[in-house]
Amino acid sequence: MQETKNLSHLATGAFAAAGILGCGMGYADEQVETLAPSVVYSKSDYLIGEVDAASSGVAGRDELSRRPILRRGELLEVVPGMIVTQHAGGGKANQYFVRGFNLDHGTDFHVGLDGMPANYRTHGHGQGYADINFIVPEFVERLDYGKGPFDTRFGDLSTAGHAEYQLYDVLPEGMLSLSYGSYDYYRFLYGDSWALGRGHLSFGMEYSHENGPWKKGDDFDRYNIFARYHVGDADNYWNSTFLAYQGQWDSSDQIPLRAVEGGLLDRYDAVDPTTGGESSRYSLSSQWQMSEGGTKTHLDTWVGYYDMELFSNFTYNLNDPVRGDQFEQSDSRIFAGFDLWHEWEHEVFGREARTRVGLQSRNDWINDIGLHLTEARDRYETIRKDDVYVGSLGVYVDHETRINDWLKVGGGLRGDGFRFKVDSDLEANSGSETDGIVSPKFRVVMGPWNETEFYFNAGLGFHSNDARGVTIEVDPTDGVTPLDQVDPLVRTKGLEWGVRSNAVENLTTTLALWYLESDSELVYVGDAGTSEAGDGSERWGVELAAYWHANDWIHLDGEYSWSHAQFVGVPSGMKDIPNAVEHAVSAGITLGREEGYFGSLRARYFTPRPLEESGSVKSDESFIVNARVGYRKENWEVSLDVLNVLDRNDNDIEYYYESRLPSEMNGVEGKHIHPAEPRQVRLNVVYRF
């Protein structure tokens, strides 16, 4: 088995090194760059005949840049039905909700950048943790998204769906941007591209700072660097990309509602003023593609380093009335992988067909992933500390045949093998495990009739569990109490029926009816350092979206989603899944041409949601409106963002659990909130060259 692991490491390293350092050299010697014409992508694009599901789509740079957003993670709200909030400091990954999932910080929703995964497996804070602070919006050309476990390209952590960012190969123009706003917000951005040798070199950097409305201040500093060298055109190319991110922040964790209502705390206060963290991420990646006739071969490779130190305190003085309950979660890792696929067009019994085969590998070498008790960020006890290896190898085949001019049938088969190895400071919790899973997919596309297409999708998927829960034997808090291990891989299932129509000129509408089932909710409790068996669950719902280009300067869009989520195999009256959002609505209007005045108004609403399994305790609703007004003239652009226009006292997140304030004699169960930020303004000045 050790030999197998070494071969997996060697294969990944060889592919990464070849892709990053040399895969384009021979190609570059033969090719001179021919830039493809700039393409503008939009969710209202005519995608009939291009996608295989009603819930799939694409958003472009204009769509991303038009949105007045408070946080970086809100870029993902271009995915219909997605809600992005925050329950701590700005440098921590956001809280994501979609299709009845409280995704925590990314679990069960794959986020990637140019083929490189952004979710972290066996993460110090939670499985599938997806921090996208390293992505700079102005350098993103498009975002491709899909829902459900139906795409053979995506395996682990993609049951709810996926979103893939694609950076510009060559920036469309040079850019210098300055922003200043409420609560000590300021941001500097620079980016440009130059012809160099046979290709183009692009470079960009970003720095931002903000304190937020918090009494102690977030003091969130973010640094980003982007560099890419690209050779080729849209069909045949190679590029190498370096990304660097560093962030540090003070965190305002959620606070007990009883303290706010009793006058002990302001809404923007903190119980523990010393929480916060820091994180960094560095990666070197490469893409290579060769096309000829009806064939195409593509290779993505990546290698990188990530670390995080996160200090939190959710229960205050419940466990330790003297020192408090603050704890540190640490994570330091090297990650590497590749994604290689080959696709060709051919005929099956005289019918047009397309087949793709792919091979993927992903490896994480995690050093000192730990959970520690701290006081004012000083460690005084280690609950557990581990060195972990998680590796996977995936292979898939996908095929589709056009039966006639109105029927296309496709499907695929994906197989994934995993190896987990844990070296724990508590020997009983050390160990290794291997597991594998096979996931078939099936789809039917019918139409178009009257510019309308119909879809049916079915598929099996899965998510991996935290490696520490896979090998655990005893509770790390006492080193004695036996604990049950969790399944390494958990089966999920999905169905979707949908329709997409462009029957009305300049109007795109989509409708999707869906069903998802999971054998087990994710089970490792990162805040406690233990594992606990999770019940199975099922979800179903409806998504409706409409995008209307009224004319060349007015664009309206609206999205509605309804989801029902429940545990299965549990007593009646205890089936509600905490923080599963039932109704969510997003709508907006964008005005303006390439020059002159422009504006954008966006609203997002979601209904109260259960905070515990009986459903007797619910959160409040949330309704946030953001706006932007501005003026463009030649190379200059000036705009003003107004965030939370209505200045509503909503909450970004609510939880229900037991905690104890320093002034309380015993623990008290109740709501804990992280408030939405109040109304604020940001002035942006952009010069393009």
Image (tube, rainbow, N blue to C red):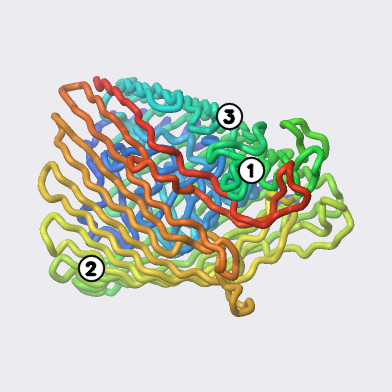
Please give the label number shown on residue 10. Answer: 1
Q: Nearer the viewer, residue 37 or 591?
A: 591
Q: Is residue 382 left or right of residue 203?
A: right
Q: For this rendering, which residue is in front, 585 or 662?
A: 662
Q: Secondary structure at mark 2?
A: strand
The residue pinned by badge 2 equals 453
Which element type, helix, strand or loop, lies under badge 3? Answer: loop
First in sequence: mark 3 or mark 1?
A: 1
* Residue highlighted by disc 3: 216
Give the amino acid at mark 1. Answer: Leu
Report how far apart the C-alphas of labels 3 and 2 lie in the structure.
54 Å
Residue 568 x, y percent position in the rendering: 58, 75
Q: Are marks 3 and 2 in contact (CB under 8 Å)?
A: no
Snapshot quadrant of residue 491: bottom right
Q: Amino acid at mark 3?
A: Lys
Q: Residue furthest front?
A: 262
